[in-house]
Image (spheres, coloured by chain):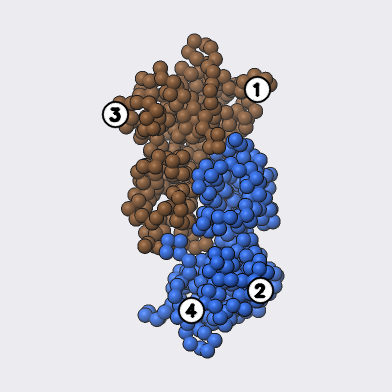
Chain colours: A blue, B brown
Amino acid sequence: MISEFELIRRYFTHRARRAVLGVGDDAALVNVRRGCELVVSTDMLLAGRHFLRDTDARELGHKALAVNLSDMAAMGATPRWATLALALPRADTRWLAAFSRGFMALARRYGVDLIGGDTTRGPLNICVQILGEVPSGMALRRDGARPGDEIWVSGALGDAALALAALQRRTRLEPAELARCAARLRRPQPRIALGLALRGVANSAIDVSDGLLADLGHILECSGVAAEIEFAALPSSTVLRRYLDRRIAREALLAGGDDYELCFTAPRRAREQIVRCGRRAGIAVTRIGRIRTRVRGAPRLIVHAADGTALRLARGGYDHFG
Amino acid sequence: MISEFELIRRYFTHRARRAVLGVGDDAALVNVRRGCELVVSTDMLLAGRHFLRDTDARELGHKALAVNLSDMAAMGATPRWATLALALPRADTRWLAAFSRGFMALARRYGVDLIGGDTTRGPLNICVQILGEVPSGMALRRDGARPGDEIWVSGALGDAALALAALQRRTRLEPAELARCAARLRRPQPRIALGLALRGVANSAIDVSDGLLADLGHILECSGVAAEIEFAALPSSTVLRRYLDRRIAREALLAGGDDYELCFTAPRRAREQIVRCGRRAGIAVTRIGRIRTRVRGAPRLIVHAADGTALRLARGGYDHFG
């Protein structure tokens, strides 16, 4: 059977461009640019919880890194380095080759060096740590939203959750529709370029990984503010719009996880600049509401339906221990 | 049931001393000192593989951080920040409280800030990433051993493996003996102070996590050299010495993992300085052999028995996919 060291050498060693010392010592050594803060995040992915058990290994390699890159995007950070800890039921070389292809292709696209890792035998578990850089004081945080800020989201929301519902047979889609939505679920695209463009423009940002209501909720809580959003303004794909009469599609739009779009806030005067940021980053940006002053006793987040009434919200989003 | 956010807030949020932004955003922000390289490592621990299933949660919290701190020690780095990703079968508050006590107590002792994490439901899996600092160019690496270097180890070897063998009923120890050895298994002490003292003194270093033969083997391979060590010189506890007639004790000494001592090499002229380093760090240091020039076809590592003959080696140590 393939040894741990051979496994790392074969699938996960590449020439690190920006590392003093890469994979193969007790630790890696890297230099953080002068004038930059180091940005650190980690995500753990489990079969049956964060991805379906039959997920293609290459797509899983992509997704494991993508969800971490999305955290860098939400901070306005440039991703630089990653570590990968992997528990595998067995050293399946075909699976590993496919997984590393997906992981490494995305790493190369964003200039990320894989500088360390750990492999062990056990129930499939993928833990990635991502390290990035941001000029000091320029990070996009959750606690910067101010009353009067407008709320924006990138891309379209809900397709990933709608695909998941269809794959789990909780709803039905046409095959071509499912294929389009499932691509969002399986190969999320981190909005790195948009995050970088929004530095110095947006007051706060988060990535939509747990659903819009939950993630916008984190901004509101960290910033001590309230918000109103317009259901009719939420950007959605043509597929999702076709099914807006289904409750499951509306929930996907408001509370579906796994979209990995950015939700951010900015003052009104930044409107045109934000549209330019989106254009430069090659992704649509849509205004969906406004930050309000927090009033004790009043709801923190109100969603207005098209007729002006407030929607009743069942569930705030996806909570890993909910 | 306790939510993920409440869980993080209750057990894993402490005021980060050296972080710009700690737990609670998409990522943490920290500043790496000018003139320092960032040192990065990760380890994943699984029940039944890296610890016994009935391991006390507090000891597990200690150990999960300790094995990562040990990587910092082996690099001569000052540990600064950690992230923790945790998969748990259920949100067991008693277990979490104990785990975080063990983890956080060790973090405080070494001034390490827990700056990020992820919790999810799944088979128990603990993934820690550690970040440290080392003055540029000063890290202790695996590839610096030179022919003529003397080989040293800190502390005593083999107690952890002997305890594991006794706990798994592969051998028997007196209760008091087991207690002493098991403490090494359950509460390993990272040799941070020694690693720091050895900067600029040792040519290479590694921590003994997979067993002396395997870990010294990594130094030899990375440095392109060979070595001879004296079995009789290997430092061991009084307990282990009592059982040296047992094959299992000899194997624990040579190939037992989990000791988390340092193995390092240095030129002969550094002898006295190394003894002073050990004294300052409060840990014994013992010379066990010498680095030789690599000769093709000859064994990379020879272990001399007390009578001068070379020992036959069965197994190089612990390999996670062996």
Secondary element type, mark 2: loop
Please identify, in this view, whether the residue under mark 2 or under mark 1 is nearer the observer.
2
Badge 3 crowding class, 10 Å Cα cut-off, few under 14, some 14 to 19, many 20 or more, is few
For the residues tagged 4 and 2, is the chain the same?
A: yes
Mark 2 chain: A
Q: Chain of mark 4?
A: A
Quadrant showing the C terminus of chain A:
bottom left
Q: Looking at the image, which residue is at 47% across and 84% down?
A: A310
In the picture of the structure, the residue carrying the numbered disc 2 is: A284
**Marks 1 and 3: which is nearer the front?**
3
Mark 1 vs mark 3: same chain?
yes
Q: Which quarter of the rendered picture does the N terminus of chain A lie within?
A: top right
> Badge 1 is on which residue?
B294
Q: Are marks 2 and 1 on the same chain?
A: no
Q: Secondary structure at mark 3?
A: helix
Amino acid type, mark 4: Ala
Q: Rounded to the nearest whole Å, what is the CA distance between mark 4 and mark 2?
A: 22 Å
- The structure residue drawn at horizontal position 44% and vertical position 26%, both measured from the top left corner, is B252
Which residue is tagged 3?
B176
Q: Is residue A133 visible?
A: no
Residue A192: x and y in percent read 63, 63
The chain to which mark 3 is attached is: B
Q: CA distance from mark 2 to mark 1?
A: 60 Å
Q: Quadrant of residue A3?
A: top right
The chain letter under disc 1 is B
Where does residue B288 sit, x and y in percent of width and height? 50, 21
Contact between labelled residues 1 and 4, with CB atoms less than 8 Å apart = no
Q: Position of residue A158 (x, y in %)?
A: 57, 71
Mark 4 is surrounded, within 10 Å at the Cα level, by few (under 14), some (14 to 19) or many (20 or more) other residues, namely: many
Seen in the picture, residue A6 relative to B91 is either above or below; the reply is above
User: Label 4 vs label 1: CA separation?
Assistant: 69 Å
